[in-house]
Image (spheres, rainbow, N blue to C red):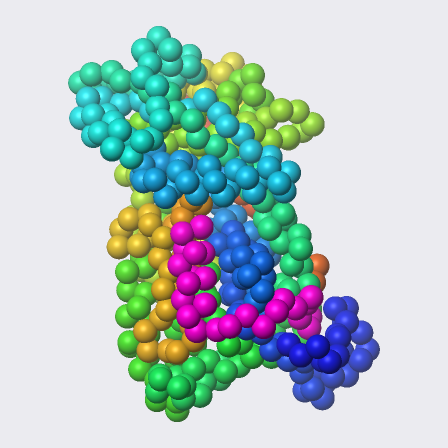
Amino acid sequence: MGADEPEFDRGVSLWEQAREYLEWYPTADVDVLVVGGGVQGLVLLDELVDRGYAAALVSNTPLGGGQTFDWPGALAKGYLNPDRARREAVDERWLPFAEDARVPVEGGEWYVCSTDHPYRHLVDQWDEAGYEYEERELADLHDVYREGTVFAKGSGEHVAAIDEYVIDREALVEALAADHEERVVVGDITAAEFATGEASAPALERLTVETHQELTLQVEPDYVVAATGTGTHRFVDSLVGGESFRDAGGDADAVRGSIDPVTCRNQLVLAVRGPAEDLPAVGAYLPHKGMSVVPRRHRHREANYVTWYVTNDSAAEDVDPEDTTDEAMGTLDPEKVEVGYNKLFDLVPAVKDRAADGADLEFYAYATLQQRIDGDAVPHAEPLAGVENVGVALPSCAAGVWQATDDALDFVADAVDPSGPVDGVPTGGDPPYGQLADDRPGARWLDWKALGVRYPRVQNRPDAVEK
């Protein structure tokens, strides 16, 4: 953006209303436009600005929406995928960033509980990758787990203590955006214009954004990076499905083929919330059961509360990417909710017993969409085939954000020279932020009795069903 370009007010002034009526739309001329306001998009924007690029970000939801919204904040160093890059991303990038930005991070007491076969396989992976763990006895397992069916009908009893982290997701999103609010526009991309590029493939010339302030902005980027999560397929379709792309000689199928490896699955999440004395912040992974418990400390009702986010691999199912939503909201199956809670209460009966005895525990089930790459949770960042100046950066996990960012910075640097950061773009500033996942609008947290009313087959409790 030129130094002599006029500044624009962020508020919807009378002049802006008149300009909108006359279709005298402001234009943002940037080196790189990032599309997507989750953690991946915000980290990429921060790194681009730090490297001297005139960069901006457009998000069609409040910052921290989409997949980030339902992410409990786990910064897993690799107990599931123990590669060195993942550990380095947490130790060398996430934790220092959180300390500098004063974003709360909880390093908690986590356990891996497994029978012989999965455990030996995991230990071999951990040893090879240098992942740190400490083998324990069953008696060392936290008592909230000890009395359940963790090892029922299995062979061997193995417990390992691991060191994992949970970061305050909302504080992280705000910290990442803190120095870039004037570069962030919240709105919908409604039109794309292409021209024939230097390498004969179409090049994206202009995007039209209808902001949520009911203003229109035109963006002329040298390069676009889509950090659009579960909305990637539909975003790419919107770019290459129009007349402008066809007129520029584009092959839409070639572009769409670039994101064929990106798939999605519907994941059920069971949340349990309560005071820390009743629900300790102790995480667990049970590979032979396919279940994970990720704990997050927070303040609720002016007290120290903990929320468990419980997932079950057997409850996940593939979803056609064409059927996904930008908000990453999945489809909730009541029968799977009942099966999931019954499985949880069998494994950790202390939760059921404490709730039945009157502890202030609440329950909430939701479904979220998770992005996968050929079935694995690995980063995916590369230029799109068949279009000259558009690429994708998709993390699939928190640790993968940095690898996807580094890969995206490499292909952007090959295509665009930085022209110097801009202080802001027209219509940018004061973006809204997503709320915490357990505060989703319309969420129905249920007490113990209401859980039985809503899901009557949970623990076969007909007494809880209202007649």
Specify whether residue 244 is painted magenta.
no
Left or right: residue 63 versus residue 351 is right
Q: Across the whole image, how many numbered discs are drawn on residues?
A: 0
Residues shaded magenta: 402-427
Left or right: residue 20 versus residue 48 is right
**Quadrant in which the N terminus appears:** bottom right
Report x, y in % for residue 429.
70, 63
For residue 19, which quarter of the picture? Answer: bottom right
Report x, y in % for residue 25.
67, 83
State whether residue 141 is above or below residue 244. above
State whether residue 201 is above or below residue 186. below
Which residue corresponds to the image point at 68% horizontal and 73% vertical from the top-left?
Answer: 426
For residue 294, which quarter of the picture? Answer: top left
In-front residue for pair 415/301: 415
Which residue corresponds to the image point at 42% horizontal and 63% vertical from the top-left?
Answer: 410
Which residue corresponds to the image point at 33% horizontal and 50% vertical from the top-left?
Answer: 378
Report x, y in % for residue 348.
38, 20
Report x, y in % for residue 273.
53, 29
In-front residue for pair 116/446: 116
